[in-house]
Image (cartoon, grey):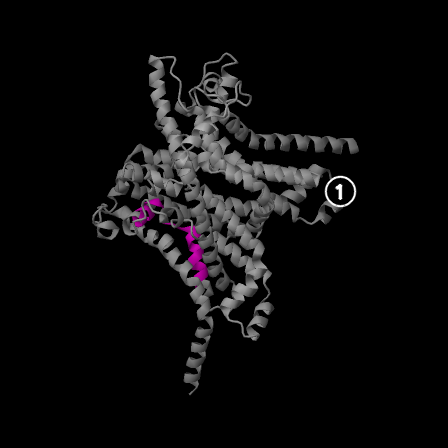
Amino acid sequence: MVDRNKGVQVLIYVILGILAVLCILPFLLLVMSSFTEELSLARNGYSFLPKKLSLDAYKFLLVDSTDIVRGYLISAGVTVTGTLINVCLTVLFAYPLSRKDLPGRNVFAFFIFFTMLFNGGLVPSYIMWTQNFGIKNTWFAYVVPGLMMSAFYVIMVRTYFTTNIPDAVLEAARMDGAGEWSILVRIVLPMSVPIVATIMLLVGLAYWNDWTNGLYYINRDNMFSIQALLNRMLMDVQYLLSNAQSASSLNQDIVLPATGIKMAIAVLGALPILAVYPFFQKYFIKGIIIGAVKG
Amino acid sequence: MEKKENQWKALKKLRQFLPLYCMMLPGAIYVLINNYIPMAGLQIAFKQYNYAKGISGSPYVGFKNFEFLFKTKEAWVITRNTLCYNAVFIILGTTLAITVAILLNEVKSMVMKKLFQTVILIPFLISMVVVSYLAYAFLSTDTGFINKSIVEPLGLEPVSWYSSPQYWPFILVFVHLWKGFGYNSIIYFATLVGIDKGYFEAAAIDGASRWQQIRHITLPCLKPTIITLTLMSIGRIFYSDFGLFYQVPMNNGLLIDVTNTIDTYVYRGLVTLNNVSMVSAAGFYQSMVGFVLVLTANFVVKKLSKENALF
């Protein structure tokens, strides 16, 4: 009996171990490729155990680093502003919704909930943002469309407020003469640190990783965020690929240029998230759980 | 006299709640612009869009855009692709996530449990653009890992992945599962942790095997979560992950038959070809059918088990 349990435990470890390795291996390949010498890349392809290591890709990026540094700065700026605005809007909308005595509460709840069921889609949104608001090639294009507030998080925060903040606490504060704003700032928010932190993480991640707004609304090189830059580089690979295929039928010796640099840029795109993840993972997992169970 | 008092009371009440309404104002304005105006903008599907006149000024053309759309072969292809991929994603994704959640729950060492949870979430954190680079590192014809390190050493012809549509249904399903299984597993795992341990102890005393416990306790306890998550996915079955279908195949024209979904079709038509009339009907079709599907899915769940319905 004991032996059999042990066997089952080993089997579980093996299966989960394989899955965990599968999650990490692609990143390992990416990193190793970015450190591989160009000639060795051309001969042996992307490999976990490259024949010859080199820092050339990164050296090249360091020499011509304006695009990447600018991309990082834009991404960081957008993420910080977007996340702050989103969290403010979400909390400000969710707190009144959590108040059972608010007249018209159901109307507002439906107003926000309905956006989860039905939406206008890309065509009218695109026309509105570009024609009426003229956000093409501006900072607004990264921050405003789609990401500034979402019904899902509003409902999540609302539910947190209703279940975790007793009416008696609010009542007592009101007795002491506190206004609604000071109740929100001094009482509700300090009691809601976990949910606010969770939203911040999830929204921040969404802003940092967003590349669609860049794709739709940005076409000027000096406005590319890191994700938009990565996106353009990827399409260039494809361009090179189609050219190289016709070229290689004429000349066998042709080598795709800058194969390693592309992987190095991808590493730089993924690095910030992977670097901070270990510090945030506890809150992150907690956040997903709160969102799932209570959202 | 009494009427006046009531009015005064109502006014006082309104004044009391005024700060709360003020708080909601910025969010309400944003939702109005970001969500509700585009809903009204859907009428563009019935118009001949004129760039200079805008949506409201363009003339109505009835169902002409729809006639045009449904006469093309694409209408069928994008509907088929969107629905079939999503159906496979829902079935395989749910099965995989539940399996992993149950396995995670069986791991005894707390350290290993935390470690597995942390690692399986990594793919979820990465943007689809980076995922496309990862896929490219494996699939590139000339330098990809699969061709250079597996196919060629075996003495086989290298495969030109990015121009062979027959492989892409499998590649896309794999990438989707790889990216999303961690997140869903954690959600199911959270539900599992919440199950009363007493059930399992009682079952063990009665001599139930581990497998029987999973079948008769774990799975029934997961049922509400499974229903809710599946319901939400079915509601979104007419929408596809734009990044997965556009970025990962690198927008390659040779693969379009198996990678084109409603979202990629609309994007290509709108931004690349700038042909609004062509895609506005497709957008309308997506919004409407999507809406009907959410309502239907919720209605069915309400009939089966009321407490699991979304609304």
Q: Main secondary structure of the magenta part?
A: helix
Label 1: few (<14), some or many (≥20) within 10 Å?
some
Residue B126, percent from left and from top: 50, 38
Relative depth, front residue between B11 and A72: A72
Q: Can I make out residue A258 in this image?
A: yes
Q: Can I make out residue B81 in this image?
A: no
On the rendered structure, is B31 left or right of B146?
left
Residue B104, percent from left and from top: 65, 39
On the rendered structure, is A82 left or right of B33?
right
Q: Residue at x 79, y 33 (%)?
A: A2
Q: Which residue carries the number 1 mark?
A: B204
Q: Residue at x 44, y 77 (%)?
A: B10
**In the rendered structure, the residue with mark 1 lies on which chain?**
B
Residue B87, percent from left and from top: 47, 37
Q: Residue furthest front?
A: A63
Magenta span has B82? no
On the rendered structure, is A243 left or right of A88?
left
Q: Residue furthest bottom?
A: B1
Quadrant of image for the N terminus of chain B: bottom left
Rendering quarter of residue B63: top left
Identify which amino acid the numbered label 1 is placed on.
Ala
Residue B21, percent from left and from top: 43, 66
Q: Residue at x 36, y 20 (%)?
A: A244
Identify the secondary structure beneath mark 1: helix
Relative to B98, residue B31 above or below: below
Relative to A17, residue B18 above or below: below
Magenta span has A120? yes
Q: Which residues are magenta?
A: A107-129
Relative depth, front residue between A105 and A164: A164
Relative depth, front residue between B220 and A17: A17
Q: How many marks?
A: 1
